[in-house]
Amino acid sequence: MSKEIEDHRVLNPGTNEPFASVLERHVSRRSVMRGGLGLAAASMLGFGGAAQALASGAMQKTPLSLAFESVAGSRTDAVVVPSGYTAQVLVPWGTPLSGEAPAWGDELAMTAERQAASVGMHHDGMHGFPLDAENASRRFVLALNNEYIDQQALWAPQGGPTNAEAGARPAEESRTEINAHGVTLVGVRKGDDGRWAHVPGSPYNRRFTSATEMELAGPVAGSGYVRTRFSPEGRLARGTNNNCGNGLTPWGTYLACEENWPNIFVNTGERFPDDARIGIPTERGRYGWETSAGDPSEKNDEFARFDITPRGADAGEDYRNEARTFGYQVEIDPYDGSRRAVKRTALGRFRHEGCWLGKLEPGKPVVFYSGHDARNEYIYKFVSAAAWDPADANRPGAAYDRLEIGAKYLDQGVLYAARFDADGSGEWLALTPDARTRDGRRLHAALGLAADDLAGIIINTCDAADLMGATPMDRPEWASVDPASGEVYITLTNNSQRTEAGSEATYTNEGSAIDEHGVGFATAPVNEANPRSDNGAGHIIRWREGSNGTRFAWEVFVFGAAAADGDNRSGLTAANQFASPDGLWYDDRGDGQGILWIQTDNGYEGVAEHTNDQLLAVVPGALEGGVVTAENQQHLKRFAVGPNGCEVTGIFATPDRTALFINIQHPGNWPASEDATEVTQGDVRPRASTVVIQKEDGGQVGV
């Protein structure tokens, strides 16, 4: 999630051993930054003679080299890229999707209708879907998450929002803000001059907002948990919200991941246990949309649904279950504008940071990974019941039912939570009704559910993971997978609930659905892996799956730090120091080679005083020992820096790797023009934007 909207109330109320203490013992067993995968774990998982399985796989070949000089840290209102590169602003917030809307201006008043027909606000995860194989690197549909809004920028012409903190919000303002969230689909193309542009009026241009009607699918669909006055059968939902990271499927659909959605609701009455655990406010929603209810222009409870306080005789008479229609992976067909988006509930209900495809192999299940971005929450894996059939692979430009294929792989399967053990091994814990909890009970019984109530387990995913003994982590965010080796990387961005060395952990069970066995874990003391209280630097871990799919081996890949920190475990320098790793993408260059791109959402002062948020590149296959150390710093370089106030997020490249796309979210005073590198002179109305980075000579980015 963006640090701009992190909910500091949210933390895991479980009692499972936190990753911090697991890692402390792991560090004491061996030097994490020196040895690669532990011998015991490698042997146990059947990695054969490759005792350094994570470290040595790519060392058989000549590794890639990063052919650019690390850029200096920057604190300017501009994007900084290496010498020989250009950076172009593309589809900033408010860009009209048709050719008929008025051109942008700092004084342009945004309306609900105009926003619904324009690019949404605060760009985050994204991907490009080619329209044909021949022009895949020049012409595609850009699917783009719009995570949240900046009310001051949105309402700048009128001096800010009305009644932002108290009182009733004007219906038109609430409606406009609702339409600024969600997902944007927009056709883009590269011109003969090498410049990129969106395609106004493209048949693929489309918005999904916090009001768009969507389908529910999987175990929760049709259950009593999601019955509302709008959908008494529990089959439909309205809107997708606070989509942060993203995912893509091998059959050609986009996954928008609902993350900070609880804050848009309010419950002032009796609460479901999952409401408290997930962080539903009790006084006022983040934007107060519920206060617009009763306006004469309101249609079909468009605002009333955000107040989930029980009022009727049953769920069919109110919106007590409305929040339970959120917290899922949302599948969108970017090629077919006639289809609704589908919320795939089998992949769990929590604050999804992303949805990352695992190694894809014919005849084996399809795997997706996701992190729950909150302090002391968990990492999850979904394994499809259906085996992958290459005949289902995407055929760009062809017309067929991609969402039907999605149902085949995403509506049935097993959801797992991860436990990390001190010996460098780990286990995936199945969240199924009959699974045995830590104390020997059946999971359904421990949650107070019927024996066949998989929907109830999905609704209470977090509590189920507590009971099974998953390892609380330091805010798991983006993940990415090396498609050749299957190695999974995930960012653990920070944890503001790290306390001083020698202090005791504190606990709370407020709102937990579990019984006296689930005393809540609230804070944890620092340890060797997280040596700072209020840990702001974060780190990246990786793992490789074992042969049976339920065991894995893990290690720390790199620790974030300031170069001047006394405990700079990865030996970072002024040329590559970073903190709070967030976005992540493994850029496969073929033949087992690749670049891991790391993006930051930093609030750690030791780094922030030297540079704005940034994009770094590292070649894992070039690292002696397989992890970042003081001896191999030349393989980790700062590639780009964002403008003041921003987060650098969202990333992918064209198939030919000649254009790298990133997003600049919540800039403070940018962009000044279409040239992203132009330093803003004076003040502008800030606009989140996609930025296209290319080499001046047209070559591949990074090498």
Image (tube, helix red, strand yellow):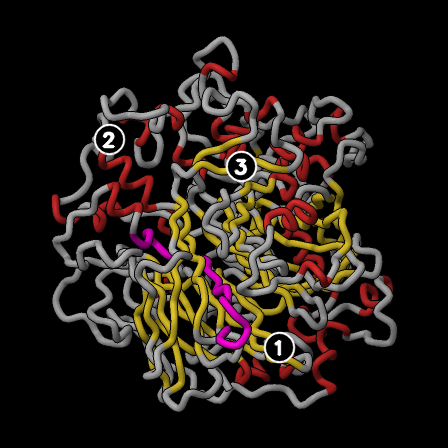
Residue range (magenta): 118-136
Give the x, y percent position of residue 657.
50, 79
Residue 580 shown left or right of residue 586 in the figure: left
Q: Nearer the viewer, mark 3 or mark 1?
A: 3
Give the x, y percent position of residue 37.
74, 69
Q: Earlier in the sequence, mark 3 or mark 1?
A: 3
Which residue is painted at 18% across and 59% down in the image?
A: 103
Q: Nearer the viewer, residue 682 or 330?
A: 330
Residue 261 shown left or right of residue 194 in the figure: right
Say which residue label 2 marks.
171
Vertical order, 124 against 620 (above or below): above
Q: Residue 616, can we see it?
A: yes
Say which residue label 1 marks.
620
Secondary-structure class at tag 2: helix
Q: Is disc 1 in contact with disc 2, using a CB cutoff of under 8 Å?
A: no
The answer to which image quadrant residue 519 occupies is top right
Q: Residue furthest top?
A: 313
Say which residue label 3 marks.
215
Which residue is painted at 66% across and 90% down in the image?
A: 62
Give the x, y percent position of residue 259.
48, 45
Q: Nearer the viewer, residue 663 or 562?
A: 663
Secondary-structure class at tag 1: helix
Amino acid type indicated by mark 3 = Glu
Packing grade of label 1 (10 A; few <14, some 14-19, many >=20) is: many
